Amino acid sequence: MKKCVMFEIVRSRIAARTRTLAPARLIRFGRAQSGAAAVEFALVALPFLALLFAILETALVFFASQSLETTAADTARLIMTGQAQSGTSPTTGSAGYTQTDFKNAACANLSSLFDCSQLYVSVNTYTSFGSANTNTPLDTTTGKMTVDVNNLPYSPGTPGSIVVVQLYYQWPIIVSLLNGNLANINGNRLLVATAVFRNEPYQ
């Protein structure tokens, strides 16, 4: 009987002390600042890193676009000066570059960030600058918008011809959720570089 009474007394004291300490511990936990920085960083880390990567990807796309423009201007000089028309084809050995030769020349000027198998080349001639067409040939018959590979002419022209050289490249977009306006074709960014000029009076 005495043991039961003692047990009840001890239990009641422990319960009373627990009720007294519980609010104090909760208050101390709420005021604790030791792990606040870690918790706050965990909350903002994912959106911050995603936004940072989206900014870097946008800058990379801009750099790739400028690189493709430079390549188009440099490679177009092969046609403007007549080197592509009068030179010897590296692949066939015949006179004049083929479309594959011209594409390989463009690939040689591109940085290692590009995959040359995804590069498309279009070269066409016109009678005047006003009639020059710079629209991108697109194919939507498969349900996905892609570059129409069957509508990529190669006509470098003769001395005095008006020539339009265009390079197309589908740059992959990784952070598509934050860069919704960056992807414009099949989840990728279609980069287009154009050079319009008159061929020199080469011999």
Image: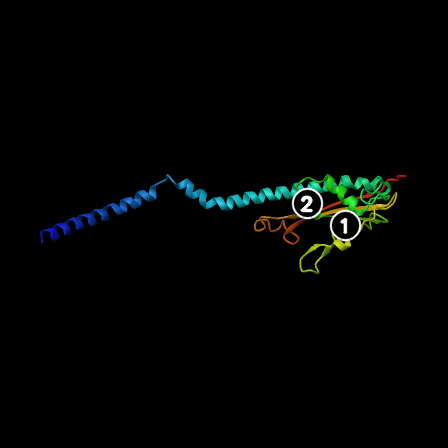
Residue at left offset 78%, top offset 46%? 100
x 20%, y 48%: residue: 14
Q: In which quarter of the image is the N terminus?
A: bottom left
- Answer left or right for 187 relative to 120: left
| Residue 173 % position (x, y) | 62, 48
Left or right of 189 in this view: 152 = right
* Mark 2 residue type: Asp
Q: Which of marks 2 and 1 is in front?
A: 2
Residue 195 visible here: no
Q: Where is residue 144 in the image (x, y as percent from the top left)?
A: 67, 58
Q: Residue at x 80, y 44 (%)?
A: 91
The residue that label 1 is drawn on is 134
Q: Which of marks 2 and 1 is nearer the N terminus?
A: 2
Figure quadrant of residue 83: top right
Instruction: Indicate the quadrant where residue 197 lies.
Output: top right
What colouring does the structure picture have? rainbow
Q: How far apart are marks 2 and 1 (CA)?
A: 23 Å
Which residue position is annotated with label 2?
Answer: 115
Is disc 2 surrounded by few (<14), some (14 to 19) or many (20+) residues within 10 Å?
A: few
Corner quadrant of residue 140: bottom right
Q: Residue furthest right?
A: 203
Regarding mark 2 in the picture, which secondary structure is present there?
A: loop
**Residue nearest the viewer, comparing 181 with 91:** 91
What amino acid does circle 1 point to?
Thr
Q: In this rendering, would 120 be left or right of 163?
A: left
Provide residue 133's location: percent of width, then percent of height.
79, 51
- Marker disc for residue 24: none
**Left or right: residue 176 compared with residue 132:** left
Q: Is residue 60 visible?
A: yes
Question: Outermost residue, left direction?
Answer: 1
